[in-house]
Amino acid sequence: MKLVPLGDKVVIKQLEAEEKTKAGLILTTQSKEKPQEATVVAVGPGGLVGDVEVKMVLKEGDRVVFSKYAGTEIKFEGEEYIVIRQNDILAIVED
């Protein structure tokens, strides 16, 4: 089975929190803050959402930065994902 988002929705998998600071200090579980970066797992078809035409610009595998409180966290087949509107994704991270 796989997740297939509808409309302007995107399924993302949030990146893991860093274990160490840039200075080399090891962080405890309570000190770790989840990053606002994720990898795109699936992209909806876009199309007419309400009365607005939405063109999807993301693709599977893109690394993105998203709004902190956006989306809905779900658990699917033992993995944690976030289903979010494309509009709540702020940027694509490019190398």
Image (cartoon, grey):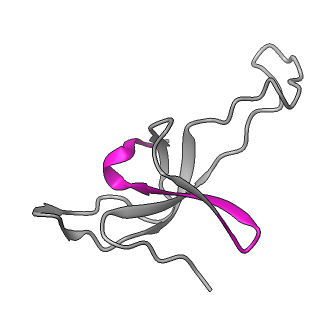
Q: Is residue 78 magenta?
A: yes
Q: Is residue 82 or residue 37 the one in the foreground?
A: 82
Q: Which contiguous range is marked in magenta?
A: 75-93
Question: In the image as oriented, which residue stretches furthest toward the top?
Answer: 23
Q: Is residue 47 left or right of residue 25?
A: left
Residue at screen point 37% across, 45% down:
88
Q: State the image coordinates of residue 67 (x, y, percent, origin top left).
A: 44, 37
**Looking at the picture, does residue 37 appear above or below residue 60?**
above
Question: In the image as oriented, which residue stretches furthest toward the left?
Answer: 51
**Looking at the picture, does residue 79 appear above or below residue 2?**
above
Q: State the image coordinates of residue 40 (x, y, percent, origin top left).
A: 51, 59
Residue at screen point 47% across, 46% down:
64
Residue at screen point 85% across, 18% down:
24
Q: State the image coordinates of residue 17 (x, y, percent, origin top left).
A: 73, 37
Location of residue 6 (image quadrant): bottom left
Location of residue 56 (image quadrant): bottom left
Q: Is residue 8 left or right of residue 70?
A: left
Q: Is residue 4 or residue 71 the one in the foreground?
A: 71
Count of number-bearing discs:
0
Q: Majority secondary structure of the magenta segment?
A: strand
User: Which quarter of the image is occupied by the N terminus?
Assistant: bottom right
Q: Is residue 48 magenta?
A: no
Q: Is residue 33 left or right of residue 10?
A: right
**Looking at the picture, does residue 71 appear above or below residue 25?**
below
Residue at screen point 39% across, 45% down:
89
